[in-house]
Image (cartoon, helix red, strand yellow):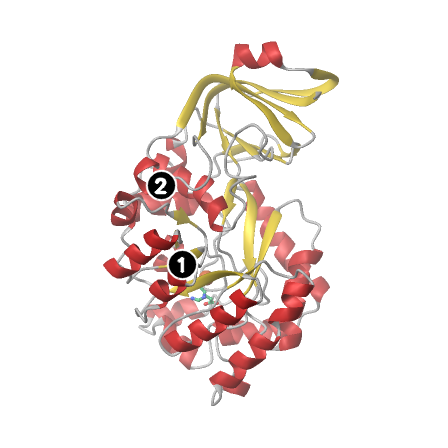
Amino acid sequence: MVDDMILHNIGKLITFPGEGPVPGNSMNDPLIIEDAAVTVSKGKITGVGPGKEIWDRADLSKDAECIDCNGKCVVPGFVDPHTHLVFGGSREFELGMKLGGASYLDILEAGGGILRTMKDTRALTVEQLVEQMDRRMDKMIRYGTTTVEIKSGYGLDIDTEFRLLQAIKASDHPMDRVATFLGPHAIPPEYREDPEGYLDLMISMLPQIKGSNLAEYVDIFCERNVFDLEQSRRFLTAAKKEGLKLKIHSDEIANLGGTRMGAKLGAVSADHLLVSNDDDLEAMRENGTIPVLLPGTLMTIFEERVPRAKDMMEMGLPVALATDINPNCMVESLQFIQALACYRLRMTPNQVLAATTANSAAAIGVGDLKGRIREGYDADILILKDGSFDHVVYNFGVNHVDTVIKGGNIIHRGLEW
Ligand code: NIG
Ligand code: FE
């Protein structure tokens, strides 16, 4: 195979060995190659190893791109496995309400929060939704995210939920996307007295979502005053029968048993997990469900507790991290989340890197293509401005990515701090 790109003079290449999710107790043991090089052909990685070895076996085309990494650190493109990127409007005014003592669920109960965004979202066409989502992805890719999961969930009616899923598919942004149907994100005002009726409506959409390949996953917000355990089970069971893969928002504020239930149904991930107990963690381990932690959300809901990241890792769970970007948590930068995970969840830089590459890729079912710098994988690669990944969490609030390579194409080079 003729190589069309070589990255050479890499001071330190960091990736994770093996395939599949990295068990929690191995997340501190990356594969580090010093003085490394990587070759790429047609968007795929063809060689990774010590520079001399790779130069010797590279078969470079005459116009191959030779990228001198100047001794800097190279890591896999980041994978953000939990986002709500497609919505209208913004909710900066809720900050004052929260500072004044209103809780996240108080605001939702009063018709704000998700229900406020629902109104702003219903007003938009597919084209407008794509335009706004693309601008957010422009920012994310500059901060090193090369693959995202995107949930619907701000339409809360059949037409708008379909438009949201269409927008995720219709975009021609270079960012790779995995779509999740989150119709049961909140109960819309029309169904306030009839949540089961709303659930029936959302379940009625599943065959078309599957048939038209509009989403690979479904998700539900299993929470006090939103969807209870039995409703969550009913929805996820119906989706599973339809052949869709499962995710669940669980244990964010109250523990309703959603994590255990989701894990037993074979959910690929359970997300939030602030108030998960030992049985929940054990159920995730038994069923191979990946815990996705969202430290940005904890910050924006003024939550001082943190999920049990260390316990999860010690028991071998392959912890993943995500931005959860949504109008309540407006953060495009996965680098900021990486820093929060270190300072708030006490994860080491290596654990943080595993959680935003190999494990986050596994949490959205793309772990065999993304999240590692490995032969046969997609050439989604970042060149950092520093010689080690530790700087990313140490010196937070700035952009440590210099170069973004996506599917073998240079998307950004020489990015500003
Ligand atoms: O994951 N918790 C539920 N859903 C989102 C928040 C959505 C919103 O507030 O708009 C989350 O944090
Ligand atoms: Fe979320």
Q: Please, is residue 334 above or below residue 30 in the view?
A: below
The image quarter in which residue 168 lies: bottom right
Q: Secondary structure at mark 1?
A: strand
Rendered-image quadrant of the N terminus: top right
Rendered image: mark on residue 121: none
Q: Tell which residue pokes out farthest to the right in this image.
A: 62
Mark yes or no: residue 73 visible. Answer: yes
Residue picked out by circle 2? 23
The image quarter in which residue 342 lies: top left
Q: Please, is residue 50 above or below residue 287 in the view?
A: above
Which label's residue is closer to the chain start, 1 or 2? 2
Give the amino acid type for the residue marked by disc 1 in the picture. Answer: Ala
Give the amino acid type for the residue marked by disc 2 in the picture. Answer: Pro
- Decide which of 257, 128 is in the foreground and name it: 257
The image quarter in which residue 386 lies: top left
Residue picked out by circle 1? 270
Residue displayed at 67% across by 48% down: 173
Mark yes or no: residue 228 visible. Answer: no
Direction from residue 245 to residue 165 in the image, left or right = right
Q: Residues within 10 Å of mark 1 (few under 14, many from 20)?
A: many
Q: Position of residue 52 (x, y in %)?
A: 54, 10
